[in-house]
């Protein structure tokens, strides 16, 4: 699985959009970009994933650059409950075990 | 659906004791996983299973054993607990599909003294 690079931490104002960057310059053509988050003391929670096209769901939007070497997770209206560690993961679908390789993530603090 | 459930939530063990961490899912998922998370670190895969009767090692399997006799349950056994096994343990499951996501349980916090 390709390695990802994320900033270790960032702050965001409540009600504003939070833009979380992720670099995955060695991503392969068949690797998807996944985002999970982990709220303190809880299990990781799936947010969104994509291959090439931008994706949106009820939680967030995922913007993937045309060369697929980086992506941005957008939380459109951050709330205090969005304070968590956000993990960007790239992996191949269908690989044996489909394990997730978690890096350090970005610690997001949403402030009132 | 309860999703993925884990018991106990917290346990203190003495060095050399053994215990079983329970994990169950009610989503009829084929894939199940055990991860551990040390303080301030990401998750590391201990064992995984692709279906009943089939298990395989992950990144850090030493000191642990698993079994998968049913689709629903995937217990993790610690034999001869060591302080290095102090961690938070997460169980997860996923459906075998092209674009699958993993659903995690709430975790078991284990302290070995």
Image: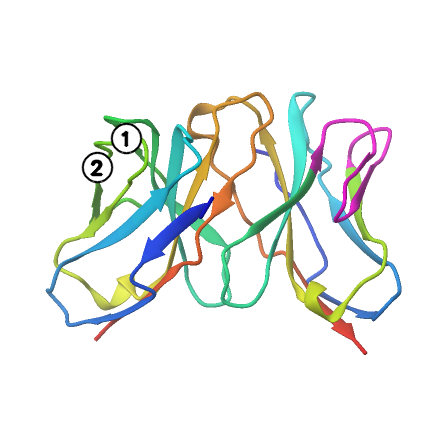
Q: Is residue A41 above or below residue A38?
A: below
Report x, y in % for residue A29: 70, 21
Disc 2: host chain: B
Which quarter of the figure has residue A107? bottom right
Q: Main secondary structure of the magenta part?
A: loop
Tell me, for residue A80, which label it has, or none. Answer: none
The magenta stretch spans residue A68: yes
Dot 2: within a 10 Å radius of its alpha carbon, few (fewer than 14), some, or many (20 or more) residues?
Answer: some
| Residue picked out by circle 1 | B55
- The residue shown at (27%, 27%) is B52
Q: Nearer the viewer, residue B41 or A12?
A: A12
Please state, as top left, top right, bottom left or bottom right, where the N terminus of chain A lies in the image.
Answer: top right
The magenta stretch spans residue A52: yes
Q: Nearer the viewer, residue B24 or A72?
A: B24
- The residue shown at (24%, 34%) is B68
| Residue picked out by circle 2 | B67
- The residue shown at (58%, 50%) is A45
Q: Is B46 positioned to the left or the right of A51 in the image?
A: left
Residues at marks 2 and 1 touching, judged by CB atoms closer than 8 Å = yes
Report x, y in % for residue A12: 82, 68
Report x, y in % for residue A26: 68, 33
Q: Earlier in the sequence, mark 2 or mark 1?
A: 1
Q: Is A111 positioned to the left or the right of A93 in the image?
A: right
Q: Nearer the viewer, residue A46 or B71?
A: B71
Dot 1: within a 10 Å radius of its alpha carbon, few (fewer than 14), some, or many (20 or more) residues?
Answer: many
């Amino acid at each position: 699985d390709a390695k990802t690079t994320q900033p270790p931490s960032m702050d965001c104002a409540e009600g504003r959009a939070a833009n979380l960057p992720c670099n995955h310059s060695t991503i392969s053509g068949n690797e998807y970009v996944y985002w999970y988050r982990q709220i303190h003391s809880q299990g990781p929670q799936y947010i969104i994933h994509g291959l090439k096209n931008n994706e949106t769901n009820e939680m967030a939007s995922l913007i993937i650059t045309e060369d697929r070497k980086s992506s941005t997770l957008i939380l459109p209206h951050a709330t205090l409950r969005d304070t968590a560690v956000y993990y960007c993961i790239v992996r191949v679908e269908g690989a044996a075990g489909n394990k997730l390789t978690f890096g350090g993530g970005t610690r997001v603090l949403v402030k009132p | 659906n309860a999703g993925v459930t884990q018991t106990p939530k917290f346990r203190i063990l003495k060095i050399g004791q053994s215990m079983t961490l329970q994990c169950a899912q009610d989503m009829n998922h084929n894939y199940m996983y055990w991860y551990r998370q040390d303080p301030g670190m990401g998750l590391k895969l201990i064992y995984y299973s692709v279906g009943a009767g089939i298990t395989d090692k992950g990144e850090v399997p030493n000191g642990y054993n698993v079994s998968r006799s049913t689709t629903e349950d995937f217990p993790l056994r610690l034999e001869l607990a060591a302080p290095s096994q102090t961690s938070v343990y997460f169980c997860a499951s996923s459906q075998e599909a092209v674009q699958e996501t993993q659903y995690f349980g709430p975790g078991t916090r284990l302290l070995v003294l």
